Structure formats: C-alpha cells, structure tokens
Image (tube, rainbow, N blue to C red):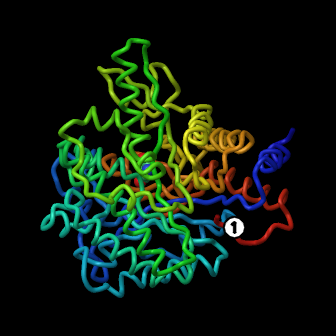
Amino acid sequence: MNNLNCLDALCARFPTAFVWGVASSAFQIEGAAAADGKGPSIWDEFCRRQGVIVDGSDGEIACDHYNRLESDLDLIAALGIRAYRFSISWPRIQPTGSGAINESGLDFYNRLVDQLLQRDIEPFATLYHWDLPAALQREHNGWADRNTAYRFAEYAAIVAKRLGDRVRSFATHNEPWVTATIGHEFGHFAPGVKDRAVATQVSHNCLLSHGLASQAIRSARSNADVGIVVNLSPVSSATQSPADRLQASREDGLLVRWYLDALLRREYPADVLEYLGTDAPKTHAGDAQLIAQPLDFLGVNYYHPIVSTVARPFSPARDGAAVTDMGWEVAPAQFTEMLLRLDREYELPPLFITENGAAYRDTLIEGGIQDEDRRAYIESHVCAVADAIERGVDVRGYFVWSLLDNFEWASGYTKRFGIYYVDYATQARILKRSGIWYKNLAAAFNRTHAGASSLPTTP
Ligand code: IFM
C-alpha cells in the first residue's frame, strides 16, 4: 500500500463524525503576561523563583500567541483541522480571581472564538489549565481553600454567558491530578507546595469546583457540553513482589480511580482513603453528589504508562524501553488497553482524547524538521485509538498535543511537543514532518468520509 492508501485505510477505521483537533493552553503559548489588565497567575510568580524552571525561563512572551492570534489560527486552518482545544486564562478575565470582568481580557477570547468560527474550526474551551490568579493563592490559599471552588464557578458562569453562544464544549479542569499532586505534593509545579494532606484537599476542592462549575455553565447555557479532562496512565508493577504490586495498585488508585470513581461513581476508592489516613481530604455532606454531575464527555490525556516499584514510584518508563525526550515510554498498545479497561470498569460518557503527543529534539535542517520519531508516535497512537473504537469504546475525537512548541512548565522551552516548530528568537513557525502527516490524515479523512457534515459534531 502506498502512503495515501495507508492513510485512507486508517481513516476508514474512524466514524464520520470523528473530531480531529489540535490543542494548546493559555499560559504555555499566549505570553502578554500583563497585557490589557491581565492579573498575574501562580505560574507568573512561580517562574520568578530561583531554580524551579530548568532554563530559568517564564511565560512573559512564550509563543507571543496573544499578539499573533490570527496568523496562528491560520496555521490550524492550513492543516485542514476543524477543531481547536485551547484554555482560557482566568486572570485575564478576573485579574484577582473574583469580582468585575476585565473586558479587554475577555475580548481576546471573543476574538479567538469568532476567528475560529470564521475558519470553520470548532472551539473546545478549557476553563482551567493551571494558571490560577495569584491573588487567590496569596490571599486565600488557592485551591487548598474550599472557597476557591465557589470563585471558580463564578468565573465559569461568566465565560459560559459570554462565550457560550458560540462555544459548545466546555471542559472545567485540565488534569486535576497535576494541579493537586505535582503542584502541592511534589512541589515541582506552581504553587510549589510539598504537603500530601494539602494536595488531597486541593484535589477534592478541584473536583468540587468542577461540579459547581458544571452546574453554573449549564444554568447559563442549557445546551453546553460540559466535561473534564483527566491525565490517565495504566500503572503496572515492575516486579511480582507483593510490596511493589501493592505500590502499583495504590498509584493506580491515586491517579486513575480517585478521579474516575469520584466523577462517575460518587465516591472515593476505599483503599485509597484508607492508605491516605489522616491525609484524606475534609469533605462536606453532599460533596460526592455535587462532584458527580452528569458528564457530556470525558477528556483523556494520554502520553505514557507508569511502572512502579516501592523504590521508584510513578516511573514513566520500564528500563530499556523506547522513550521520548521527556523520558516517557512509548507504549501505544497500553493506550488501547487502558481505554478498554475504562470502558469495562465504568459507565463512561463519550470520550475525547484531549491530548496526545510527544517531545523530541528537533533539528532544523535546510529550513525543515524531519521529526520521524514524533510522526511515528502520533500515528501509532492514532492507530491505538482506532483499535479501541473497533473493540467498542466510544471515542469521539483526538487532539494532538500540541499545535506549537511551547513553554513546557518546569522544563521551560527545552522540550518541544509542537507539530509546528517555533523559533523563539524570531517567532517563526515551521510545519514539521509530523504536522504534514497530520494534515494528510485530515485530508484523507475528508476524502474517505466525503459527504459528511462540514462541522464536527460533539455528543
Ligand atoms: O504540556 C503539557 C500540558 O500542559 C498538559 N498535559 C501534558 C503536556 C505535556 O507535558
């Protein structure tokens, strides 16, 4: 089979309404950290601490997307991709996290949505991708304080009222495990707290805020599709030793079951609560019901499996496995297995793969990037999704992480995930080989599903 026939065969494995998209997040690409009344976020402040970002960088300029909005959206249109997942910066909308709307900040997202629709690209908005208004952290203890969940619901209502006439899909949080555990237990991400009890309280308050925000969005816009995005990895034990197997099961409990049981079964897993002991979160009567609001979709971000031992918890690769530049194991078959497991164990809403992609070192050779490793990663994971769909899992869409190389949190600008290369000195964007492949995939999909409706459908 030649390349085109291969792509056609791959596309034929997906339903006609399947959504192909690209994803980004506000802090990682926008820059313009203090423009037009935006307040500082916890990441703006975190980046100022010595030694927390490997290259000492920050998000002040990033990809300068705030000032290059239209030409960046042209990049999506040039791919023939019809869906864009972006996040909204809370401190652009409410600079201190509560109170009056900063109209110029909101206007940026108004333009973003309008410009997407003009290009026939469907907006998929995420309300929180880690950039909490710094004032909420400084003055109110951030997500550790239950009141932040209520502030978040107010912000969600503002966004739903103002953008919900044109945006149908709203995800409340991106990867609450990262907010809670990496931000408040490991301390590697903002706000840099290292306290397990605080982290579990944060995870509960984030989930609570998801429930409250879902209600607020639906009362503002009854036709909105509301969901949440979780980062999931299959966890296995590196050895058969009872201690390592128990460790693996605990990590699965903390990363996967904690979130899915709360969202889909109205409870936290008993074994995890027992393991946490006095570090378990303080909850109120009725919280479980609030958290488990009906979901129109569940967003799944998948990058790699986890292999664990007591000595090396949460390890992202087996010894000797093929890894990306993040040190994350490349394991598409485990992606399929994980989707099948979710389908077996939970009453799932439709799934969207809201992030998947890989960091590799890119070298500019004669003006081009031959990132065959990233292309192969994306292709193998798209195939893994097709396998899951064929085995009965209701997956409705796939978003590549990421549209552009960007600020990779504590790794600064040292890791590149984009299908467009960004030359940070000039802000030039260059389509990589992986991007050309994705563009060809979108074209093949349109060809093999010709006659389908022009806009992707959400559940
Ligand atoms: O860049 C991040 C993104 O912000 C959240 N999900 C994982 C990506 C790669 O680390």
- Residue at the spot 31% in from the left edge and 85% down from the top edge: 101
Whether residue 82 sits left or right of residue 138 in the image: it is right
Q: Residues within 10 Å of mark 1 (few under 14, many from 20)?
A: some
Q: For numbered disc 1, what is the local secondary structure? A: loop
Q: Is residue 44 above or below residue 117?
A: above
Looking at the rendering, which quadrant does residue 284 occupy?
A: bottom left
Q: Report whether the residue tagged 1 is closer than 8 Å to ligand 1.
A: no
Q: Is residue 367 visible?
A: no
Q: Nearer the viewer, residue 345 or 77?
A: 345
Q: Nearer the viewer, residue 398 or 286?
A: 286
Q: Residue 116: image x %, image y %?
A: 58, 76
Whether residue 26 sits left or right of residue 17 in the image: it is left
Q: Residue 121: image x %, image y %?
A: 63, 72
Q: Amino acid at mark 1?
A: Pro
Q: Residue 239: image x %, image y %?
A: 42, 14
Whether residue 433 sits left or right of residue 234 in the image: it is right
Provide the residue designation for mark 1: 456
Q: Is residue 296 visible?
A: yes
- Residue at the spot 45% in from the left edge and 27% down from the top edge: 317
Q: Is residue 38 above or below residue 282?
A: below
Q: Quadrant of the N terminus?
A: top right
Q: Residue 417: image x %, image y %?
A: 49, 49
Q: Is residue 77 above or below residue 183?
A: below
- Give the residue at the far front of this rendering: 285
Q: Nearer the viewer, residue 279 or 324?
A: 279
Give the tally of numbered discs. 1
- Give the residue at the far left of this rendering: 139
